[in-house]
Image: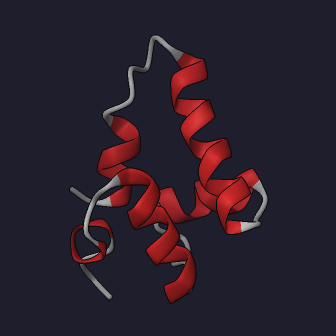
Amino acid sequence: MTFANYIETKDPNITSEKRQVIETIAKACMVDVSTVYRWINGRCIPDPLKIQKISEITNIPVEQLFPTI
């Protein structure tokens, strides 16, 4: 499951659930929420340390979150 797929699995009817996950990732990676949205949309890729942090938060292996790396 890629990072974008993971975010999409959050219930779209529960906006706060999706937003909370994005804010948690942004805070853990010390970036702005807009940066996380760029990662989700594939416009840029986080650095390896941030990818590892996202993996820890989502409990999804790095290789699945960002398979093109």
Q: 38 or 55: nearer the eye?
A: 55
State left or right for residue 57 relative to residue 16: left
Numbered disc total = 0
Residue 26 position, x and y percent, is: 68, 56
Residue depicted at x 62% and y 58%: 36
Residue depicted at x 51% and y 78%: 45
Residue 17 position, x and y percent, is: 52, 24
State left or right for residue 44 relative to residue 1: right
Q: On the image, which quarter does residue 23 sit in?
A: top right
Residue 31 position, x and y percent, is: 76, 65
Residue depicted at x 30% and y 48%: 5
State left or right for residue 35 relative to residue 52: right
Q: Is residue 1 above or below residue 16?
A: below
Q: On the image, which quarter does residue 34 sit in?
A: bottom right
Q: Is residue 48 above or below residue 62?
A: below
Q: Is residue 66 above or below residue 56?
A: below
State left or right for residue 7 relative to residue 64: right
Q: On the image, which quarter does residue 56 sit in?
A: bottom left
Q: Quadrant of the N terminus?
A: bottom left
Q: Quadrant of the C terminus?
A: bottom left
Residue depicted at x 52% and y 31%: 18
Residue 55 position, x and y percent, is: 39, 65
